[in-house]
Amino acid sequence: MDSAKQTKRVTIKEVALHAGVSMAAVSKVLRNAYGTSPAMTEKVRASMAELGYRPSSAARGMRGRTYTIGVLLDNLRNSFFADILEGVHEELLDTDYTVLIGAAGFDPTGQAHTIDAMVDRRMDGLILIAPGTSRGEVLATAADTPTVVIGHHDAAEVHDSVLDADDMGAAMVVDYLVSLGHRRIALLSSPGTKSSQWRKTPEIVLTNGYLEAMQRHGLEDAATVVRAPYSDEGGYKAGLDLLSATHRPTAIMTGADVAAMGVFRAADELGLRVPADLSLVGYNNTALAALTSVQLTSVDQAGRTMGSTAARMLIERVEGRRTRAMQTTMTPSLVVRRSTAAPAS
Amino acid sequence: MDSAKQTKRVTIKEVALHAGVSMAAVSKVLRNAYGTSPAMTEKVRASMAELGYRPSSAARGMRGRTYTIGVLLDNLRNSFFADILEGVHEELLDTDYTVLIGAAGFDPTGQAHTIDAMVDRRMDGLILIAPGTSRGEVLATAADTPTVVIGHHDAAEVHDSVLDADDMGAAMVVDYLVSLGHRRIALLSSPGTKSSQWRKTPEIVLTNGYLEAMQRHGLEDAATVVRAPYSDEGGYKAGLDLLSATHRPTAIMTGADVAAMGVFRAADELGLRVPADLSLVGYNNTALAALTSVQLTSVDQAGRTMGSTAARMLIERVEGRRTRAMQTTMTPSLVVRRSTAAPAS
DNA sequence: CGAAGTTCGTATAACGTTATATACTTTCCT
DNA sequence: AGGAAAGTATATAACGTTATACGAACTTCG
């Protein structure tokens, strides 16, 4: 007699009994399936409400869907992901789907585990934000579960993609900085995962865009690319390296706002002022960049739109309204704030 | 012949066949249940590995557990939550449990939906971070599913709690500001949800701590409390109000770092410098506060420890090693940075 | 040496849904 | 009127696990 633990949940059977119909009928109403008269639907709905019926996702998952969408991301600190998530939620607000997020860390193994966990839970669809897992694993997963990959530019027949024209973004930054008079413009990009088989990760596309733009301006000799994790610490270390070199750059662009903050810290420590001594440009235009005390020039990626687009594409697939893979590319835009200026001559 | 869609998953049955044992035996090995010889365990494990077996969480959920822990939070932008999450992940790293996060928004209805969704999915345990849902709903959920509530100070027999001594935190801030010479110290706290039945939400406890401390210093007449959502926008509006009043405060403390950033923006717009004209104190000591260009004095809450503690308590309950409810209270500490100074005389 | 434990393994009934096959009514056309 | 087609509702076999009950083979011990 353990003080009435575990209140028994109402099942489809009891609803059927209460409404005076078969279990199959209740199931049909639940799924909006064909073969239900308005009268019966109404009756069943009423019984469900009265009894407080809630379908068991576990049981549903054994045969049909679970009405769950999984979102994989590496960490919660990058507020660009919060933008994307907002878009996903917005799109799925009035549907029966629930969004569950897996924060898998930066380690590819951990990410693979999380993806597996989502598949084990029979999630209906997956949104993978710049997964560090090998391409092969993602393709294998996507073969069985509808998947949208955000970030990577590699097209695939088996999954959909939403991405940002990062090459264009890089070019915009370089063009802008050159127009201010900068020539020694360095890029801080992410190291990426070794042998992940992705050929066009965001950082690779970004780097190519940067190099092409530098070349276009005849600045190929002034181009410098350093690799560091997109974090405050990563930006700090790379910033120290870059800024203590003999011919230090007059401008640094980073692949993420958070890394730019680390560069800022390094500059501060070396007694360099932004933007007087160093122009700094971030990427993603997160809330961080807009802070009064920060005012970081950044590239906006419309994360919210990317999220809602990904969600819409995913549901189309889940519900079988589309079988062909597709890619959506967003155009970035430059947001100029106070971290950039003409170089000291 | 749809190009071999849906690769058939390996089931317990096939593992049993391959290992030459019964399904029951495989299930036992899977659960580390009693009644398995080392030899058989080894054999089954080998078969599972060879066939690439993965248990179906849906099927498991129908009778036993799902090995899933759900974490409810309102939004992803508050990086204090990321700290908590890190602690949760850390604690659960070497276990079979997977953490799934629901970002439910600030709306109580949305949060209730998300909690229901987690229960529908038969999650083994729930961690609710300062839920805005009514206390009654939380108690009802906790009666069936092991639950840890983070933030709210209301004790309950049915769920565990992890909280921060917010009254002490407020007192520390007031004491410090008074020691600097401040007298007109305002508090910006969260509005909280109407009729949520929680009597001791973090913001209420914080406010009480603040009022008591002001009183202790004989400053009850100088006490001002304004309520605004913990967001940049909320802080901005409240900041404008406070700082454009005739007798404006010389110091403002906020219940969240992110709100302090909004106050900063308001001060900037009014031509007030921090800390010369206004001392500003945040709460949570998020990464935001530590940024070079921000340097916000804040109260550290040891979010990571709160997360790992919550996870440990939850697993104890899930695995039935404890049935009595318990509360853990953390002691906050003040981190002084450059946003506070003596008031201009 | 037989009774009473242990230990290890098996058979099988749940668990709560979905989807397929089927039966019974109507409605719609010649 | 007669038969096909369309519309409704039902019965029931999965789905992949877990947990209980039970049986068989060993030990232990008085």
Image (cartoon, coloured by chain):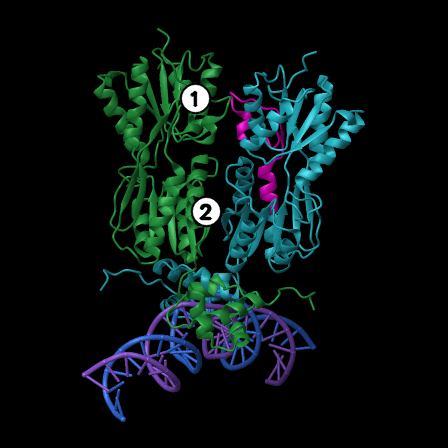
Chain colours: A cyan, B green, C blue, D purple
- Identify the residue at image location x=63%, y=16%: A277
In the image, residue A111 sits, relative to residue C26, either above or below, namely: above
Do the residues marked 1 and 2 share a common chain? Answer: yes
Residue A296 located within the stretch drawn in magenta: yes
Disc 1 and disc 2: Cα gap in Å?
A: 29 Å
The residue beneath circle 2 is B102
The chain to which mark 1 is attached is B
The residue beneath circle 1 is B263
Q: Is residue C14 left or right of residue A318?
A: left
Q: Given the image, on which type of amino acid does mark 1 rest?
A: Val
The chain to which mark 2 is attached is B
Residue A38 located within the stretch drawn in magenta: no
Q: Can residue A327 be seen from the camera position used here?
A: yes
Residue that lies at the very extreme toward the top in this rendered image: B345
Q: Position of residue B342 (x, y in %)?
A: 36, 12
Q: Is residue B161 left or right of residue A206?
A: left
Q: Position of residue A64 (x, y in %)?
A: 53, 64
Given residues B252 and A13, the one toward you in this image is: B252
Q: Can residue A23 be seen from the camera position used here?
A: no
Q: Quadrant of the C terminus of chain B?
A: top left
Q: Secondary structure at mark 2?
A: strand
Given residues A325 and A79, the one toward you in this image is: A79
Q: Secondary structure at mark 1?
A: helix
Q: Which residues are magenta?
A: A282-310
Q: Position of residue A253 (x, y in %)?
A: 65, 27
In the image, residue A11 sits, relative to residue D5, either above or below, namely: above
